[in-house]
Image (cartoon, rainbow, N blue to C red):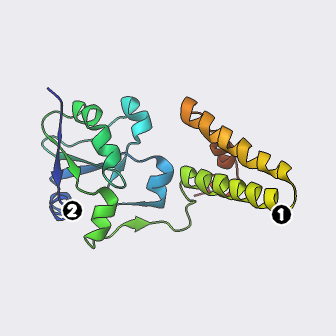
Amino acid sequence: MTAMLLPLPPADVRARINDGRAVLIDIREADEFARSHIAGAQSQPLSGWERAHIRIAPGADVIFTCRSGMRTAGACDRLAARVAGQAFVLEGGLDGWSKAGLPLAVDAKAPLEIMRQVQIAAGALVLLGVVLGFLVSPAFFGLAAFVGAGLTFAGATGFCGMARLLMLAPWNRARPA
């Protein structure tokens, strides 16, 4: 039988957290969590799920969340398998929480998530290559082709060289506490 996560509306999740009856586990990556999260949530990125040490009080409900609910839904078997008893998912994720008018802990100074940075950089390079290809020299179309090939390689292998380079950028380095 396939494990399931029962959906809970944001108001019910908030009530359970406020009553101390639940622990909220955010499965987004650390850079996403740093930018915004629900106060009191535990960060347990899905990428390290098998190594995660989850702190759950006996008898507490376990509620999982991500940004929209899609990542949680796609990993429900992996998530529910680590919980004794029933597990839950925040309906609509952080987006649903925010739409319900509930507060998020936001750090506007935290850098954008690395994949958003990759999308911005890749899109800008492709656009630049196409514009320069038309206005300056057709050789600049090679820039757009190079970025497209890199994105294809990243999708096929899971290794994104642009993300690795962006992680080294000064704005992505850890700030002193």
Counting residues from the start of the chain, the first of labels 1 and 2 encountered is 2
Q: Which residue is mark 1?
A: 135
Type of amino acid under label 2: Pro
Q: Position of residue 5 (x, y in %)?
A: 19, 42
Q: How dense is the environment of label 1, judged by Cα within 10 Å: few (below 14), some, or many (20 and up)?
A: few
- The image shows residue 129, relative to residue 81, as above or below, that is below
* Circle 2 residues within 10 Å: few <14, some 14–19, many ≥20: many
Residue 72 visible? The answer is yes
Residue drawn at x 15%, y 58% is 16
Front residue of 33 and 100: 100
Q: Nearer the viewer, mark 1 or mark 2?
A: 1
Q: Quadrant of residue 20?
A: bottom left
What quarter of the picture does the N terminus occupy? top left
Q: Residue at image x 29%, y 32%?
A: 78
Q: Are marks 1 and 2 in contact (CB under 8 Å)?
A: no
Kind of residue at badge 1? Leu
Q: Nearer the viewer, residue 15 or 147?
A: 147
Q: Which residue is mark 2?
A: 10
Location of residue 145 in the rendering, given as x and y in whole percent from the top left corner: 72, 44
Left or right for 25, reference 168: left
Residue 39 in percent (x, y) is at: 33, 61
Identify the residue at image location x=23%, y=30%. 81
Secondary structure type for disc 1: helix
Regarding mark 2 in the picture, which secondary structure is present there? helix
> Which of the 4 image quarters holds residue 50?
top left
Q: CA distance from mark 1 to mark 2?
A: 51 Å
Quick check: can you spot residue 26?
no
Give the answer, above or below, for where 3 lies relative to 70. above
The residue sitting at the top extreme is 1
Residue at the far bottom: name it.
Answer: 101
Residue 58: image tag: none
